[in-house]
Amino acid sequence: MKALQYRTIGAAPEVVTVPDPEPGPGQVLLKVSAAGVCHSDIAVMSWPAESFPYALPLTLGHEGAGTVAALGDGVSGLKEGDPVAVYGPWGCGLCAKCAEGKENYCLRADELGIRPPGLGAPGAMAEYLIVDDARHLVPLDGLDPVAAVPLTDAGLTPYHAIKRALPKLLPGSTAVVIGTGGLGHVAIQLLRAMTAARVIALDVNEDKLALARSVGAHESVLSDAGAAAKVRELTGGIGAQAVFDFVGAEPTVRTAGALAAVEGEISIVGIGGGALPVGFGALPFEVSVHAPYWGSRGELIEVLDLARTGAVSVHTETYSLDEAPLAYERLHAGKVNGRAVILPNG
């Protein structure tokens, strides 16, 4: 089969031919309909050799959807042809966090060498994908796999962060979304669907601010040195009760800290390497700062349920598997408006 692999440190990913996989006991073979392209992949491919955590070659793609092609021994509850989405942050299934469905916070994944597809395990940018356990598959139930596949990360990750902040997002509150690309434009829709908050979008790119307005942002602000002051002006000097930073770079986390309200909440979701000092006097009183990771299996089901109501959708552009390296080039150049999706089987 064909697969997109990161094969050499510092080089671009390549489309190669690899052996067709076969499911072992307890595993599921998926014929991949769609695989999402994510900035996290670019971050992985930017790591130097001395700190690279995975074995090469690595088949990319931690967002996947497709149809069940074959079942390993002992698998029940699925049949060939079932359309499913892949829950990506695999865990051991047995620890306290996994028992809550929070496999994204599995307590033994590192110890046991368990990795998500595309982030250590072979990923979804291939014609076929081995899923380690049937519990990591969620029925699509009528959703288009191209439209649904970004929701497994670009939907689930902001949903998880926003759900935590819901007690802050009462009528009269303000939520700020920093970075309105793949995850951010979904976050805006989730905020509009789940809260009564006024939503202010920040980005350095006017096209992405236009996308933010089109999906429901009440206000849009250019993310520059004056952004925090502008948000405080829009909020009568109070600031935002919740700030979601989907960039996570040093300038954006500083902006997040500068525009948060007293008792506000800051979620640093992006992996741009920024850090926000926390301590008395460093931020307004009782501001909480956290760095969430992905979401639970139950939350993925909730996100897909929201998509079925039409409350959230992802702006996508599609590419064949042979065009996947181009998709990464466009993403790295900031030319993808929304989310790029690879169609490994056409």
Image (cartoon, rainbow, N blue to C red):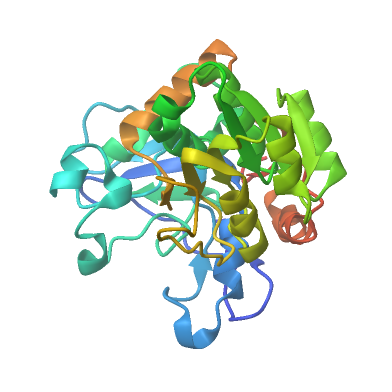
Point out residue 4 in the picture as x, y percentages from the top left corner.
60, 61
Left or right: where does residue 68 sit relative to residue 271? Answer: left
Q: Picture quarter containing residue 233?
A: top right
| Residue 179 spot, x, y in % from top left | 68, 46
Q: Quadrant of the N terminus?
A: bottom right
Can residue 117 be seen by looking at this rendering? yes
Q: Above or below — where is 135 with respect to 60?
A: above
Q: Residue 288: horizontal and vertical position, in percent?
A: 41, 47
Q: Considering depth in this image, is 10 or 250 the residue closer to the camera? A: 250
Q: Residue at x 43, y 54 (%)?
A: 117
Q: Nearer the viewer, residue 291 or 97?
A: 291
Residue that sits furthest to the top in the current view: 309
Residue extending farthest to the right is: 206
| Corner quadrant of residue 41 | bottom right
The quadrant the C terminus occupies is top right
Say left or right for 210 vs 232. right
Q: Residue at x 19, y 60 (%)?
A: 108
Percent x, y for residue 3? 58, 59
- Counting the numbered discs, the total is 0
> Which residue is painted at 86% across and 43% down in the image?
206
> Where 13 falls versus 222 (above or below)?
below
Residue 272: image quadrant is bottom right
Q: Is residue 33 visible?
A: no
